[in-house]
Amino acid sequence: MATIRQVAMRANVSVATVSRVINNKGYVDANTRKIVLKAIEELNYVPNSVAQVLAGKKMKVIALIVPDISNPFFAELAKAIEEQARQKGYTLFLCNSSEEEQKEFGYIEVLKSKSIDGIIFATHHLNEAMLDHCRDLPVVLMDRAWIKQSLNKDTFVISARNQRGVQLAIRHLLEMGCRKIAHIYGPQQVITARERRLSYQKEVERFSWYSDSLMAPGYFQIEGGRKAIQALLKKHPDIDGVFVGNDTMAIGALKGLHQMKIEVPHQVAICGFDGIQMTRMMEPELTTIAQPIEAMGKKACQILIDLIEGNKKPKQHIEFDVQLIVRGSTKRR
Amino acid sequence: MATIRQVAMRANVSVATVSRVINNKGYVDANTRKIVLKAIEELNYVPNSVAQVLAGKKMKVIALIVPDISNPFFAELAKAIEEQARQKGYTLFLCNSSEEEQKEFGYIEVLKSKSIDGIIFATHHLNEAMLDHCRDLPVVLMDRAWIKQSLNKDTFVISARNQRGVQLAIRHLLEMGCRKIAHIYGPQQVITARERRLSYQKEVERFSWYSDSLMAPGYFQIEGGRKAIQALLKKHPDIDGVFVGNDTMAIGALKGLHQMKIEVPHQVAICGFDGIQMTRMMEPELTTIAQPIEAMGKKACQILIDLIEGNKKPKQHIEFDVQLIVRGSTKRR
DNA sequence: ATCAAATGTGTAATCGGTTACACACCGTGA
DNA sequence: TCACGGTGTGTAACCGATTACACATTTGAT
C-alpha cells in the first residue's frame, strides 16, 4: 500500500500539499493538484483510515448491537441500517450479544478501543452502568428501551407505538367475532414485551370473560409460542382468538394449533406483532401489527450520524406509528 | 480516554514499561508490574487499537460479505461466524452487498483502508479482478465459489457436497413413490445453483418421463419458488414431486401449492436444500438437504484466523457433507 | 573476585496521516 | 513605493501505541 509520503515524492511536493488535495482543504494550485492526482492514480493510493483516525479524523464506522441476528426482525433492521449507513459513507460493525449482558459490555469496550463513532443499541440490559460505559460515545436506542430512565442522559430512542398497536389488534379480533382472547407475552424485562402485555390487559379487563390465566409466556421464541398456545387451550378450551406479543411466537402458535388440529382462523384467530416478512409465508398468512422496520432503522442511523457529525440536534425520542395488516389468520369470512 | 503516557506518569515508569506489562513481553519487575496494573486500573486504561495497528499490530477484525443478511441462510451463517470470531478475540464487520458487484468492490476498498485483517466472502461475483483487488489480504470463500478458478490463487474455499445432496434428495423422492420429479433452480451464475441443477439432470435423465421442461427458475427467492411451481404444474399436471434448489424457494413452492389447493405431500412431495431453521416452521414441515451451516461458518472463521496469524497452513478446499432430513413434506404414509 | 548472562528500565524512532505555523510570492490600493 | 491580504507550499509537531537499542544492575558460574 502506497503512503502519502510516496505520493508526495512522486509528485515532487510535500505531504501537506498531498493532504490538501485529498481533503480539498486550503490553497492548492490547479496545476499542482493535477500532478498530485496523477501520482495518486498511478500509485493506486488510498489514505490509511487508521492513520487518519489517529490524527483526529472519524473512523466512519458505526456499530449495531442486536440480541440475535438470526431473528428476522433484527436481520431486517440490520439490513436497513446498513443500507443507510453505507449511503452516508459509514460502514457497519455488527455485534450479536446473544442476549448476554456481559457480551454487550465487552463489545462496548472493544468498540471504544477501536474508535467506533457511534452505536445503535437494541437491548433490554439498558441500565445506568451500561449507559455510563458508553459515555462520550453517541448512542441511539432501538425498540427496547427504558425511555424514562435514559432521557435524562444524552441518549436517543427510537420506538414504535406499542399501546396503539395492541389496541388495533384487540379491536380487530373483537370485530372478527372473537369472544375470548388470550395473550402470549415475551420476556417481561424487555420493555416492549411488558408494554404489550399491559396494553392487552388494559384493553380486555373490562370483559366478563377476562382472567389473568389467559396470559402465558412465550419468551419471544417460536417454540415458546407453540407451547404457550397449547397450555392456554388446555386451560381454556373456549379461547377463540389470541393476540401474540411478536410474530416469532405467533408462528409457533400457528404450528401448535395445527398440531392440535384446530383450524385457523375459524376456531381460533391469531394476530401477531412486528410485521416481519416471514408472516406472509405461513399458511394461513398471519395477521400482524406491522412496525415500519425499515423506516425505523434508517431513522436510527440518520440520528446517530447527525449526533456524530454534530450538524443538528435531533429529537430525543421518536415514536413510529404501527399498522394493522389483516391476513388469513384472522379473516373469518 | 487515558493514554499509555498517562499511565506511565501515574506509575512513575516509562511508556515502554507499561507496554511491556500490557503485552506480557520482556522483563518487568514483579513489583513494578503491580504498580503499573494499579495505575491502569485506576485510570480505566484500555489500549487504543488504532494506535496499536499503526504501530504494526493486528486490528483483530474480520469482515463477512454476504449478498443478503435478511436471507436466513446468511443470517445463520453470520451468527456462527460471529460467535467463533468473538471467541478468538476478533470482531466481525458485516457487509451486505445486495448481490451488487460494485458494492462488493467498494467494500473491499474500505476494508483495506481500515486495516481489516481478513475477509470471508460469500459471493458469485468472484473473478480475477475481485481476487486481485483482495491481494495481500487473507480471504476465505464460502458456499458460492469458482473453486477451480480460485485454487491457483492464495484462496481458500468452504463448500458443501451439492451433488451428493441432490442424489439423496432425488432418491428419497423416488422411494416415496414419486414418478415425475420437477426441479426449481436458482440463478445459474451462482455456482451452487448450477451444480444442483446439473446434478438433478444427471440423476433423472435416465427416466422416460424426464424432459427439460421439468425445470423452472425460482431465482433463490420465495416469490420465485411460488411462481415456478405454478408454472410447472400448468405444463405438467402429473408432477408428483419437486426438488427445489434452496429452502427459500421451497417455502414459496409450498405456498404456491396451497394456493392451488394441491395437497402436500399426498399429491406433490417437496424437498428443499440448505436446512435453514424456517423449514421446521412450515405446515407441513419441509424435508430438506441440510448443510451444516454452523460448522461451515465456524470452520471458515477458523481457517481465516489461521491464515491471519500464520500459525498453520490450512487446506485450500474443505467440503462438508450434507444430510437428508425427512419431514412432513415428503412423508407419504 | 571477575566476567558474562540475565534482568529491569528508559529514550527515541517509527507507523501514516493532519495541521499549525512559517515563509515566499503576487497583485492591488494608497 | 510600501503595506497588506490572498495564494501556494514546506517543515515539523502530533495522535498513541510498539520496539530497537542503550544502559544499569543483579545473578551466577568459575
Image (cartoon, coloured by chain):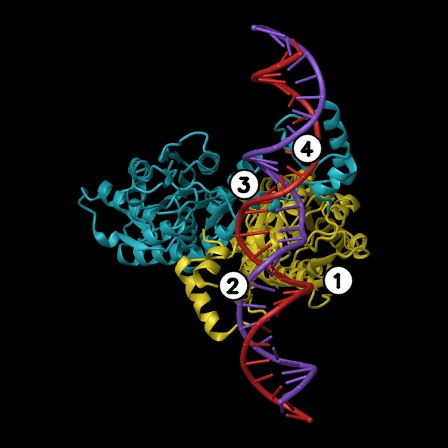
Chain colours: A cyan, B yellow, C purple, D red
Determine whether the residue tagged by mark 2 lies in a helix, strand or loop. Answer: helix
Task: Give the amino acid at mark 4.
Answer: Thr
N-terminal of the pair, mark 1 or mark 2, is 2
Label 1 crowd (10 A; few <14 / some 14-19 / many >=20)? some
Q: Which numbered tag is attached to residue A53? A: none
In this view, B179 is above or below A285: below
Task: Give the amino acid at mark 3.
Answer: Lys
Distance in Å between CA atoms under marks 1 and 2: 41 Å
Chain holding disc 3: A
Q: Residues at marks 3 and 4, common chain? A: yes
Measuring from the top left, give residue B296's x and y in whole percent: 63, 61
Query: Does any portion of residue A182 appear in the rendered image?
Result: yes
Decide which of B216, A27 is in the foreground and name it: A27
Q: Residues at marks 1 and 2, common chain? A: yes
In this view, B226 is above or below A66: above
Measuring from the top left, give residue B2's x and y in whole percent: 45, 53
Distance in Å between CA atoms under marks 1 and 4: 45 Å
Kindly report which numbered mark, 2 or 3, lies closer to the viewer in this rendering.
2
CB under 8 Å between callouts 3 and 4? no
CB under 8 Å between callouts 1 and 2? no
The residue carrying mark 2 is B18
- Residue depicted at x 50% and y 43%: A117
- Residue depicted at x 27% and y 58%: A235
Label 3 crowd (10 A; few <14 / some 14-19 / many >=20)? some
Label 4 crowd (10 A; few <14 / some 14-19 / many >=20)? many
- Residue depicted at x 22% and y 52%: A212
Determine whether the residue tagged by mark 4 lies in a helix, strand or loop. Answer: helix
**Which quadrant holds the C terminus of chain B?**
bottom right
The residue carrying mark 1 is B316
Task: Give the amino acid at mark 2.
Answer: Val
Decide which of A199, A155 is in the foreground and name it: A155
Task: Give the amino acid at mark 1.
Answer: Gln
